Structures are given as structure tokens and as C-alpha cells.
Image: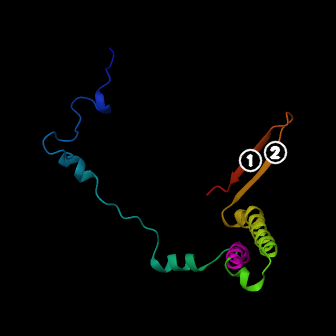
Amino acid sequence: RRRRAVRGGRRRGSPGPSPLTGSLPQALVDDTEDVSLDFGTEEELALRKAKIRHPLATFFHLFFRVSAIITYLFCDWFSNSFVACFVTILLLLSFDFWSVKNVTGRLLVGLRWWNQIDEDGKSHWVFEAKRV
């Protein structure tokens, strides 16, 4: 015996929206009630948020970015040389990239990535993430 596909992915006789009201039958509505999830007490959440695992890595993660933005905004006050401002911002953003790739990416979120070149000379990017 072959089963025939029915439009809409439902079999005949299965409950669906009522043609008159367009709403689901009462049996389906009763089964979908709100469920509260327990994420811990408010004190536990506050302690978790207040504790920084790697404060030095977090400081440098923010320091290079914020200092690059501040330098961009206020560099004209300290120097009239466009080249000096450009090089300073470029160095700060380079330090930010290096710290995110090598230090904070690994410590804070568990990411690692690198480039491998196989025997044929093709470049392959390898990405790893810490299992949670």
C-alpha cells in the first residue's frame, strides 16, 4: 500500500486551524502554556555578572578599541599631522586585532583560528571553538 502525500504536510483527520475561525483547536492551545525557566536566583546572577574571569584580557580588549576611537575623534587637538594620526590609529587597531585573535578570543570565548597550506599549495582556514 502506498501512502499519498497530503497538502500542507498534515494527514487527513489531524487537527488544524478551524476553517471558520482560523484558530487552533482548544486541545492544542491548552498544551502550549508558558513555561518558566530557572536561571538561578538574582543573587547568583549578580555574582556571576560581577565576577570577571580574566580582568587583564578584558582591559586590553577594551583599551585598544576605545583608545583608537578617542584618538580618531581628538587627534586634531594634539597633532596637525594627518600621517601621525593615521599611523597611531592604525597601530592601535593592529594591537586590537592581535589581542583579539591571540589573547582575548582564546581566553574569553575559547576561539582559535589559523591558516594551513596543504601539499598542493591551497590555503585552508581552521576554526576551533571551546565546547560548552
Left or right? Give the position of 120 relative to 56. right
Residue at which label 2 appears: 116
Specify the farthest residue to the bottom. Answer: 77
Residue 97 lies, in percent from the top left, at 75, 64
> Which of the labelled discs sits on residue 126, or is there none?
1
Q: Secondary structure at mark 1?
A: strand
Residue 47 lies, in percent from the top left, at 55, 79
Specify the farthest residue to the top. Answer: 1
Residue 65 lies, in percent from the top left, at 69, 73
Dominant SS type (magenta) = helix
* Front-most of residues 39 and 119: 119
> Which of the labelled discs sits on residue 104, or is there none?
none
Asked whether residue 58 is drawn in magenta, I would say yes
Residue drawn at (78%, 66%) of the image: 94
Q: Which residues are magenta?
A: 55-72
Residue 81 lies, in percent from the top left, at 80, 77
Mark sitting earlier along the chain (1/2): 2
Marks 1 and 2 sit apart, C-alpha to C-alpha, by: 7 Å
Q: What is the quadrant of the N terminus in the image? A: top left
- How are the colours assigned in the image? rainbow
* Front-most of residues 8 and 82: 82
Amino acid marked by disc 2: Gln
Q: Give yes or no for contact between labels 1 and 2 (Cβ–Cβ under 8 Å).
A: yes
Q: What is the quadrant of the C terminus in the image? A: bottom right
Q: Residues within 10 Å of mark 2 (few under 14, many from 20)?
A: few
